[in-house]
Amino acid sequence: MNQPTNPVTANPWAALRQFTDARIALGRAGVSLPTQAHLDFQLAHAQARDAVHLALDAATLAQTLDAALPNPAAPCLTLHSAAADRSVYLQRPDLGRKLDEASRERLNALPRPASASPSERPYDLALVVVDGLSALAIEQNVAPFLTQLQERIAPEHWSIAPICIVEQGRVAIGDEVAELLGAKAVVVLIGERPGLSSPDSMGLYLTWMPRVGLTDVSRNCISNVRPAGLRYEDAAYKLHYLLAQAQQRQLSGVELKDETGGGKELLAESPPNFLLS
């Protein structure tokens, strides 16, 4: 009895698939994608859509961060943007960039450190956690990343404002939060727009002297922070470098470049490039 032949024609680059999550060298069945590749694509698309609509469990996240990163200034604060719900958030990006009135009042009511004068910013750094377009990315990545960052900045005695968790927020909302807290620098940790192989990617945005009205020209971005992307320790290394430079040079954004390259620390731990081996 004749054995059935495999209907899939393999791609000669198939061996390269072990190095990337990108959809390369999938082969073909006639003139179409193989069934398995098509089903994998549909699953990835569904996971990306789910990540966009998943609600952030802010209360549980606050408890996790308070336990892992106790802050003498105050426990984590849970805030909300002016976008009332997910539907409004997705249709009105402008409302995701500003706080609702209750959140502004809560920040304004916080006591300032006793040593701070009314005109100065008493905190060196504000950490603002925002669900963005992937609450999944935040729930999975924030705590382990901040643990790595804390290890780097703790010896330098940065004054850290209470960590703020913002629901239905965009990147720019971090500027308003940090300005109200009185922080010289802000790092926004936000769920990035899901890709078809990365529904759990977190982005980091650094701004020096944040205030309402700044644009992306004033920010530095570190993207794709997750175990399958930029590792936590590598992202913390890069962010620590940018924070130190921002503090020293009193600026951020297009005038502040990430000059770590790979950095000796990163190159020593990174696997060799298979294209060069």
Image (cartoon, rainbow, N blue to C red):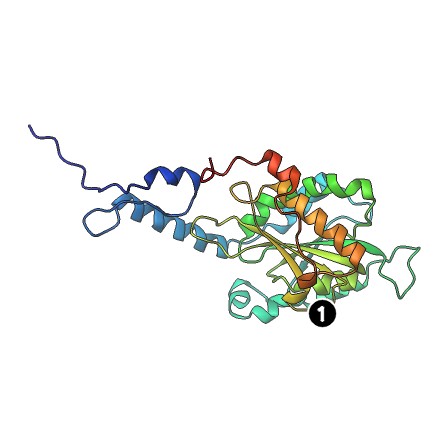
Residue bearing the label numbered 1: 212
67 vs 4, left or right, is: right
Determine which quarter of the picture holds residue 217: bottom right
- Residue plotted at (68% across, 40% down): 148
Q: Nearer the viewer, residue 116 or 60?
A: 116
In the displayed orientation, state which residue is furthest to the top: 1
Counting from the top left corner in percent of width and height, residue 64 is at 67, 42
Residue 85, how many percent across, how many down?
56, 64
Closer to us: 22 or 1: 22
Q: Position of residue 266 (x, y in %)?
A: 62, 39
| Residue 144 makes an appearance in the image | no
Neighbour tally class for label 1: few under 14, some 14-19, many 20 plus, Cα within 10 Å: some
Q: Is residue 145 left or right of residue 277?
A: right
Q: Nearer the viewer, residue 189 or 52?
A: 189
Amino acid at the residue labelled 1: Val
Q: Secondary structure at mark 1?
A: loop
Q: How many marks?
A: 1
Instruction: Residue at the far front: name it.
Output: 276
User: Horizontally, is 183 left or right of 266 in the view?
Assistant: right
Q: Splitting the image into 4 quarters, where does residue 95 fall?
A: bottom right
Task: Identify the residue at horizontal 88%, vertical 55% (top origin).
Answer: 113
Using the image, determine if residue 236 lies above or below residue 106.
above
State the residue at coordinates (38%, 40%): 17
The residue under the point 63% across, 51% down is: 58
Q: Position of residue 121 (x, y in %)?
A: 84, 60
Can residue 59 be seen in this snapshot? yes
Image quarter hosting the N terminus: top left
